[in-house]
């Protein structure tokens, strides 16, 4: 009750100002990269205001989750909300943050993975996939026929090559949810292969294949511009637990229509109306709280309730909730949802079901690995050879920890520095920037990076 009252006060205060500067380009140097299909994406090379980048240090490249942008790693108090994010630091402050004047001045920095990595001396790069971001940091939208494959095979590759071009160093890569997915897909040497359907200009004419030379280069067996040295996987996406209701003809008809939905623009429009913003954010907060209360009582009996526990309000404070709604939520392409729906309903992970000229399909066919012409990410994990640190949420909404342990961590080629942890009290959405992150997640990443990095760091 006290939490809700504080949240109401915060929202009423926020209603006095307009949302702006969502791009956060003042938090680093902005770069662009051109993908193989000609789309321009935006990258941010992070540093706090008034500071410099950690030039010459080990690069770390982070990709975002679905419906998110790079801001999920950039929690801080924006200038226009300087008087309003009244966050109190916990009494049991993480060791790495003790005595940090920047965090004392802006407690929201305490929850920023980008700031933590910069403070530890790493060269931090953040990526907005095509169609995501705001203002100066918005990447080009491109085609509505954008799938998870597109982000992994085009956008991730372009970003990694850009970082190597600028720094001359091989990065650690990774990210939250879809950011983890694009990382393991990339490491499988996946690329698009031209098919004869492309002669006729058919949509989805290319299909996914694995290139052995790319597998070797990307996993560091040979050295090149696409080599990476490890992966930070924050609740990496694969097979989402979905209720059977999602496998319906109407659902597939809706998801089969390629659309780019500008949710980021809708959020910014809502933020312009004081009353509407207050009601929207407060309603979302109460829905999350209700779901978790219902899960405590009925979760063991209801699959649907368990599947909805993807944001834990107890792992957030009012300012983090507002920051998430105001700055992190982003746009989407319907094919990305269709592909995840295929993963969930068929308990697999494969290329988009219309790839290879199968534009006539509305529903994905029953999986027949090795016999249906599809490339299956889930059955090619042995090609992933670099070390992983995987941080998994306790609650299984959207990502099931046991499934990721089985089908990623135990299925990939083992590495002596592979690690995975289940972080108690976290859910999928809040894992990267929630209340548990500074003490339970960031130090584990820092300790692991010390083992796998191949370049120096310059701690602050």
Image: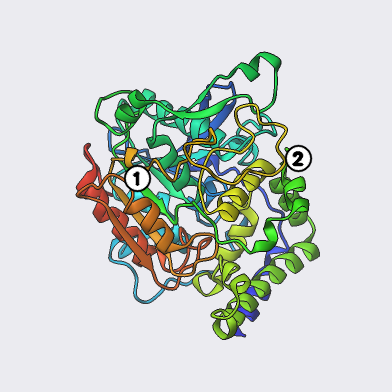
In the rendered view, would you say 81 is above or below 424? above
Q: Image height check: is 341 above or below 383?
A: below
Q: Residue at x 43, y 71 (%)?
A: 89
Seen as rendered, the residue at the extreme front is 371
Crowding at mark 2 (Cα within 10 Å: few <14, some 14-19, many 20+): some
In this rendering, position of residue 19 left or right of residue 319: right
* Residue 413 visible within the image: yes
One can see residue 48 in this view = no
What percent of the width, then of the height, locates residue 364? 64, 43
421 to the left or right of 44: left
In this rendered view, identify the residue nearer to me: 246 or 389.
246
Q: How many numbered discs, if any? A: 2
Specify which label sits upstream in the sequence, 2 or 1.
1
Of the numbered discs in the image, which one, if any, rests on residue 408?
A: none
Secondary structure type for disc 1: strand
* Residue underneath mark 1: 231
Left or right for 267, reference 375: right
Front tag of 2 and 1? 2
Q: Which residue is mark 2?
A: 257
Instruction: Compute the Cα span from label 2 to label 1.
Output: 33 Å
Question: Dot 2: what SS?
Answer: loop
Using the image as rendered, state which of residue 138 and residue 228 is in the foreground.
228
Q: Quadrant of the rendered structure where residue 222 is?
A: top left
Asked if the residue at tag 1 contacts the one at tag 2, i.e. Cβ–Cβ closer than 8 Å, the answer is no
Q: Quadrant of the N terminus?
A: bottom right
Label 1 Cα crowd, 10 Å radius (few <14 / some 14-19 / many 20+): many
């Amino acid at each position: 009750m006290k939490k809700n009252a504080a949240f109401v006060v915060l929202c009423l205060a926020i209603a006095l100002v307009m949302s702006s500067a969502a791009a956060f380009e003042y938090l680093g140097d902005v770069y662009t990269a051109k993908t193989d299909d000609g789309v321009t994406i935006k990258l941010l090379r992070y540093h706090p205001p008034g500071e410099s980048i950690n030039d010459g240090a080990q690069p770390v490249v982070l990709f975002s989750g679905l419906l998110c942008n790079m801001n999920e790693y950039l929690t801080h108090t924006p200038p226009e909300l300087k008087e309003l994010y009244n966050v109190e630091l916990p009494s049991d402050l993480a060791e790495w943050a003790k005595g940090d004047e920047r965090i004392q001045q802006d407690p929201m920095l305490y929850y920023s993975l980008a700031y933590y990595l910069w403070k530890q001396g790493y060269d931090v790069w953040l990526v907005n996939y095509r169609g995501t971001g705001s203002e100066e940091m918005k990447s080009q939208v491109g085609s509505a026929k954008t799938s998870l494959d597109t982000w992994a095979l085009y956008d991730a590759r372009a970003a990694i090559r850009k970082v190597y071009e600028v720094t001359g160093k091989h990065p650690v890569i990774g990210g939250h949810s879809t950011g983890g997915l694009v990382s393991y897909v990339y490491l499988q040497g996946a690329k698009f292969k031209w098919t004869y359907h492309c002669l006729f200009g058919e949509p989805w004419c290319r299909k996914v294949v694995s290139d052995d030379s790319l597998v070797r280069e990307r996993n560091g067996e040979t050295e090149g511009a696409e080599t990476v040295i490890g992966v930070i996987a924050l609740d990496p996406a694969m097979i989402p637990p979905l209720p059977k209701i999602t496998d319906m003809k109407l659902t597939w008809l809706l998801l089969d229509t390629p659309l780019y939905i500008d949710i980021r623009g809708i959020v910014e429009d809502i933020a312009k109306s004081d009353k509407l913003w207050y009601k929207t954010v407060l309603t979302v907060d109460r829905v999350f709280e209700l779901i978790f209360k219902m899960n405590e009582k009925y979760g063991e009996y209801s699959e649907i309730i368990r599947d909805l526990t993807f944001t834990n309000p107890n792992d957030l404070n009012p300012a983090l909730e507002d920051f998430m709604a105001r700055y992190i939520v982003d746009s989407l392409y319907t094919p990305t949802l269709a592909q995840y729906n295929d993963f969930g309903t068929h308990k697999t992970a494969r290329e988009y079901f219309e790839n290879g000229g199968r534009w006539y399909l509305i529903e994905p066919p029953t999986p027949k690995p090795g016999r249906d012409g599809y490339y299956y990410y889930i059955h090619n994990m042995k090609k992933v050879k670099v070390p992983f640190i995987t941080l998994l949420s306790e609650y299984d909404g959207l990502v099931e920890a046991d499934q990721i342990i089985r089908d990623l961590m135990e299925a990939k080629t083992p590495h002596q520095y592979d690690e995975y942890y289940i972080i108690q009290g976290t859910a999928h959405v809040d894992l990267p920037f929630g209340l548990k992150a500074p003490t339970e997640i960031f130090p584990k990443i820092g300790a692991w990076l010390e083992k796998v990095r191949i370049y120096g760091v310059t701690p602050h």
